[in-house]
Amino acid sequence: MPGPRTLLDKIWDDHVVCTPEGENSLLYIDRHLVHEVTSPQAFEGLRLAGRKVRRPEATFATPDHNVPTTDRRLPIADAISKQQIDTLRENCRQFGVRLFDLGDADQGIVHVIGPELGITQPGMTIVCGDSHTATHGALGALAFGIGTSEVEHVLATQTLRQAKPKSLEVRVEGSLPEGVTAKDLVLYLIGQLSTEGGTGYVIEYTGDTIRSLGMEQRMTVCNMSIEAGARAGMIAPDAITFDYLRGRDFAPADFEAAVARWQQLPSDPGAVYDRVEVYRAADVVPQVTWGTNPAQVIGVDAAVPAPTDFADPNDQSSGERALAYMGLEAGTRIVDIPLDRVFIGSCTNSRIEDLRAAARVVQGYQVAKHLHAMVVPGSGRVKRQAEAEGLDKVFTAAGFEWREAGCSMCLGMNPDTLSPGQRCASTSNRNFEGRQGKGGRTHLVSPAMAAAAAVSGHFVDIREWQYR
Amino acid sequence: MQAFTSHDGVVAALDRANVDTDQIIPKQFLKRIERTGFGQFLFYDWRFLADGSPNADFELNQPAAAGATILLARRNFGCGSSREHAPWALADYGFRAVIAPTFADIFYSNCFSNGILPIRLNEEDVAELFHRAAAATASEAGQYRLQIDLAGCSLQDTDGFARSFEVEPFRQRCLLEGLDNIALSLRHTDAIDRWEAAHGMPPVAAD
């Protein structure tokens, strides 16, 4: 009789195919999501070895990282980008993989369309050649990013070689203060855990704060687990999860039977985690990153810290480099930092609730002079839903650009990039040097904070916003 | 995959923490559909100035790092994006091993898929290596070398520094023998078939 098990234990135990003597376990993979940037070399590897995709029906593909977000009827201007997208199309055709292509109504960011289509389900193992695959853990799946060699391995065998990761319970208790969102919460947690605090662990987010979050907010939290070093983040499925999935395209035919199974997944009382960290929701204020990694973050009501504020020599030297790159001086109040660009989008914050929150702030206002702002919906479905609600009109009336779905300026592989020295408030997940364009300066914030910054031309405390 | 057994090489000291994969290989070079040819883009935005000329201040462009095959860095090396283009670029440039106190998980795995040995040493030992590298650079030698033996999980220089390191035995074996991981896993196809059958899945189509 096994003792009490965690959510991770249960999914892990159910998916171990075998553990050969002297080898790591083979873990069965239920769903494999594929995009154009990290898959071409994997498909080519299959071709060279004469191998096929073991379970094409468990594999779903969409181009997202490197697609234009402007008029999709026009040809792709960049020949190398076009070749990468054409290659995905040809690979999916040759190997029988379902593709949500450019022009398909359901194309979008892979981590937005997985849950949206019901491809992502509780208790599953899900992988993708992308570090933000943890997003899918919000539905109670074990989901993590892999490299291209592992993509090829999963395509060929539907399994991965894995040693079992350690478990980290991140428990958050209490109500989030007014104006504080899931994005602020996860940025705060990353700041507390550090960029490598979760390395070697799978995080399970627990506590009444987490339970009170809607499905899309939970995705925002799990999405950024990798920024704390954790390959996966997960939240036990509950009624919110089941209500979200009911009726979605790829949801199980016998949905109630599936729910009965999924209800067995949450961690048992008394289950033991390798490590536990507890935080209070009341301590979280709207967050803004000031540096060049997501743990270099602070409350909007604070000032840019000095490198000497940190005890650790690594943090001091990183802080010094970050201030130089970001063109910031210690002691500058966050609300006094002027902005050139605002980006609302990415797998972290491009879902309908994110766009609603941003539109509510923008309603009745204009984007600040000399500031360029854009909204990039996470998927074709999100875009259509937003248009049905008139959100696109709110944004465009205020001076935002309203784009087609894709990763866009989160990583700037497509033409959506910052110019050297430009400063951007972004709802994305990484503020690394050059992430949004060489020399560009990124500050990570929530959608509401980004929207308010677009109107004001600098950061403002969303808790003081005058909604119109 | 290229096997790694033992290696004697020049150390390039990159005294930075949290080096992310966006720095190792910036996104503008991820559009290629090949696995090869990424070395020219390694650390591109640090290595080259805006006009495309080499940045003389960057560690890899200094004489001490000429021909380097072992990269030394601070904590959390390889964090961020899962892009395997990062180890592809490191390997293509010529690196066979990376030494740091800690590595990000996905990057760490990706190294083993590409014949690169990531070595974790504690912070004090890494600090000592930075110290020795700086001293060697300032001396007549001009460069610092390390000898790595994967079978014995040890590394040493010629001046008394010797440490052992830990590698998961399975990964050690795969790297020592340069095993094809997919071929190795396909030996367990029967077990995969059984797992699928036990979970109510139809058999995969026969060839």
Image (cartoon, coloured by chain):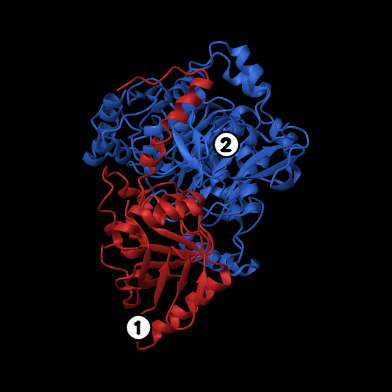
Chain colours: A blue, B red
Type of amino acid at the residue the image marks with label 1: Gly
Residue A448: image quadrant is: top right
- Residue extending furthest bottom? B140
| Residue A421 in view (yes/no) | no
Q: Pointers 1 and 2 in contact (CB under 8 A)?
A: no
**A383 relative to B4, above or below:** above
The picture places residue A38, in percent across and down from the top left corner, at 36, 40
**A92 relative to A231, above or below:** above
Type of amino acid at the residue the image marks with label 2: Thr
Residue A91: image quadrant is: top left
Residue for point 39% across, 88% down: B139
Q: Closer to us: mark 1 or mark 2?
A: 1
The picture places residue B183, in percent across and down from the top left corner, at 35, 40
Residue for point 26% across, 62% down: B52
The residue wearing badge 1 is B142
Q: In which quarter of the image is the C terminus of chain B?
A: top left
Mark 1: give few (<14), some (14-19) or many (20+) Cα within 10 Å: some
Element marked by disc 1 = loop
Foreground: A367 or A179? A179
Foreground: A256 or A208? A256
Foreground: A276 or A344? A276
The residue wearing badge 2 is A220
